[in-house]
Amino acid sequence: MALLERVAALLRANVNDLIDKAEDPEKMLKQLVLDMENQLLQVKTQVAIAIADQHLLEKKKKEHDDSAGEWHKKAELAVSKGKDDLARAALERALSHEQMATGFTQQIEDQTHEADSLRTALRKLEQKLTETRSRCEILIAQHRRARVVSKANQVRQKIADAENGGGNGAGFDRFRLRVAGAESENTAHHELLGGDSLEDKFAALEREEQIEGLLRDLKERQGKTA
């Protein structure tokens, strides 16, 4: 399905790579979230349709199963009354309904597989969207801070130039400020591209420990109710 292919492309999207290539990272990140929200809505719609189709197929199969059972009973009644011709006709009808039910069984299996695939895509896209929203908020804040730092460095450089009157000392200070500004921009760029700081690593460990704790609690509750 083209829809699932588009969802897969969004799931494979590397936010850091997209930022690195984007002329306007903030605009790109907002568009990425918007695209995910639109695809999520489409997937939800398709899941609902797939489930409805599955239920319809199951209903049709049940109708044929019930009809086959009724015709088998009629065939038994005809045999008990010595009406073999009626019994044969009833059995023929029963066989026809059984064949139809078998056909619907295969369709139900195919539809169930499709519905399960859509459900899986929906869950993954919902998780990806939640993660991307959070990540985008952080990246946008970092990008804005990097711009503020850059502008602040430019202001400090102009002040230093004015104070030193543009002499040799001013030239040295300008060079020093450019180096400092470049270092700040590199640091901000590294953060923007997702570099993991020591705090990030400890935060990840704490989150992992929290998840493991929740998992243990869940297993204990299930063990008590078992």
Image (spheres, rainbow, N blue to C red):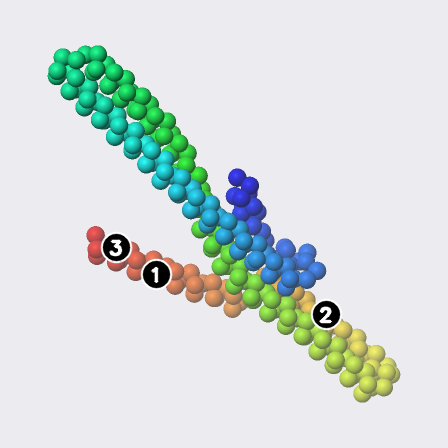
Q: Position of residue 187 (x, y in %)?
A: 65, 68
Residue 137 rendering spot, x and y as whole percentages: 56, 66
Which residue lies under the disc numbered 1? 214
The residue singled out by tag 3 in the image is: 222
> Which residue is rendered at x = 55% and y = 41% of the image?
2
Does residue 146 lie above or below 113 as drawn?
Answer: below
Relative to 14, does residue 74 appear above or below in the rendering? above
- What residue is drawn where x is 60% and y is 66%? 140
- Mark number displayed over residue 182: 2
Above-or-below relation of 53 to 10: above
Please tell me whether mark 1 sits on a helix, a strand or a loop. Answer: helix
Q: Mark 3 and mark 2: span between their CA atoms?
A: 56 Å
Left or right relative to 57: residue 197? right
For marks 1 and 3 on the same chain, the one whose residue lies earlier in the sequence: 1
Q: Looking at this view, is 197 or 148 the one in front?
A: 148
> Distance from label 1 to label 3 (Cα)?
12 Å
Mark 3 vs 2: CB contact within 8 A = no
Front position among marks 3 and 2:
3
Q: Amino acid at mark 1?
A: Leu
> Which mark sits nearer the N-terminus, 3 or 2?
2
Q: Are marks 1 and 3 in contact (CB under 8 Å)?
A: no
Question: Label 2 is placed on what type of residue?
Answer: Ala
- The CA distance from mark 1 to mark 2 is 44 Å
Q: Is residue 193 above or below residue 168?
A: above
Quarter-wise, where is residue 217 in the image? Answer: bottom left
Residue 153, located in which quarter of the rendered image? bottom right
| Dot placed on the residue nearer the N-terminal end, 1 or 2 | 2
